[in-house]
Image (tube, helix red, strand yellow):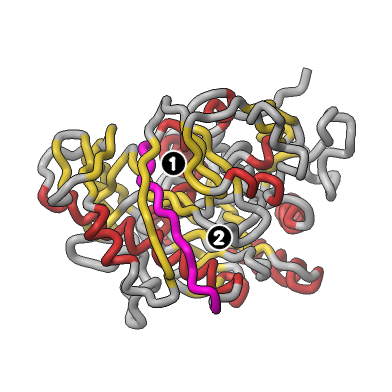
Amino acid sequence: MELELRKIAIRNIEFGTPARIEGDTLIADPDEMRELILEDSRIKNVSFDIALPGSSTRILPVKDVIEPRAKPDGETFPGTFHEDMQEGGEGITYCLEGCVVTTTGPIVGFQEGLIDMSGPAAEYNVYSKLCHLVMILEKQDYVDPHEHEEVVRLAGLKLAQNIAELGFLVEDFKSEVYRWGNIGENYNAYPDLPRVVYVYNCMSQGLLHDSYLYGRDSKIIVPTMLTPLEIFDGALVSGNCVSPGSKTTTYMHQNNACIKELFKRHGKDFNFVGIVLCPLMTTLKEKFRNRMLTVRQVKMLGADGALISQEGFGNPTTDLMIVCQELERNGIKTVIITNEDAGIDGMSESLPDSVPEANAIVTTGNSNATLMLPAMEKTIGVLKDIERVCGGNVNSIQPDGRLLVEIHGIMGGHNLQGNTYVGAVTI
């Protein structure tokens, strides 16, 4: 299996016609995009805006962030728009690097968050360094919250694919080629190095807390072996409204920091042999079932060590801990990534669950820590929705326009794949 990512650097976005890429500028046609998005009759209205790094701009409430990607000979975001889907992870995929489609509009679930393009919040995530083509969606009145989430998710993916197709005519790109063998080939690739598996937890809890694998809701699947190339190629997308600080947006799936680091050190420090995708479920019975199946597949891959990343907070920590515990009991050295919820003063119990075997933890910091954010000259979306998002409250909006929020409320503020600027150390 071989995947070539052709990355086109985008450093600016402008509106204009016809839609095209000129140098490092994406020129987007609002009328053309509006016509595309309104093909879905469940959408009452759509408008577009632009947010650039360093500008005094706030986007709120953010639902998803998506890197524009498209395949000239294949299916982008496989399984999302076609019944007869193609396998992801092979062929050529064009990527508009430095540019994202960001969706907003009337709030779907209370766990959406904000992105500031400058100021203190901009230092907490990677999104503030990207050029945002923002889509503001208004649903028809009859659309309920679950269908509202679907409408927004599909519209974002559709626009991201459409925009990325402009890259097919661009010859100035940076090529990244990834290759992946079968289980036997991977197992034997570096016999003198320890074999490492990545356990990829994804939100699968219903009630607007789901991810989508090849277009299917992940709560109806069991732990599954995947190749990293499929992840890079859009097989897994976000469809959830979990805590914005720890939410894995589609962009974070496409640019999974754990997978990138595993590839970087593959063949040097260890032998990266595979991924097991583990759905984060709601009941203990399902958690124990998934523990059994996840550990079995990690053992089938011949792992000596494992890395587990989390998504969300609260009861997903139980999934994280019990899988870690069982891997360690089977002689597989395990490192976990989690955030901490230690209260605004840092003095509360930071993890809702723990096991003695979890003795190698990478933390992305205390998500309850608060920030006072300055007022922005421009807000794309609805500022008052900060009162209903995780990390905000009815007193968040100050009389002078400033916002008092927890890091929880900043999209990607403590991303649990480590794709964040926040961390913690023992002193």
Per the image, the residue denoted by label 1 is: 260
Q: x, y (%) of residue 349?
A: 88, 39
Quick one: 221 or 370, which is closer to the camera?
370
Tell me the element at label 1: helix
Disc with the residue nearer the chain's start (2 vs 1): 1
Reply yes or no: does residue 135 show up in magenta.
Answer: yes
Q: Please, which residue is most extreme toward the bottom here? A: 83
Which residue is depicted at the point 18% across and 61% down?
72
Q: Is residue 85 left or right of residue 399?
A: left
Question: What x and y, as percent, mark residue 397?
Answer: 69, 36
Q: Is residue 214 above or below residue 142?
A: above
Task: Name which quarter of the figure residue 425 lies in.
Answer: top right
In this image, 244 relative to 268: left or right?
right
| Distance Cα–Cα, label 2 vs label 1 | 16 Å
Image location of residue 298, percent across then percent down: 60, 59
Position of 225 with respect to 26 (left or right) is: right
423 falls in the magenta region? no
Q: Residue at x 37, y 33 (%)?
A: 52
* Residue 139 seen in the current view: yes
Q: Specify the segment rendered in magenta.
A: 131-142
How would you rate the neighbour count of disc 1 (Cα within 10 Å): few for under 14, some for 14-19, many for 20 or more? few
* Residue at image location 22% in from the left, 52% down from the top: 29
Residue picked out by circle 2: 276
Q: Is residue 25 above or below residue 3?
A: above
Task: In the rendered view, tell whether residue 323 sits above or below residue 345.
Answer: below
Q: Amino acid at mark 2?
A: Val
Q: Position of residue 402 (x, y in %)?
A: 65, 29
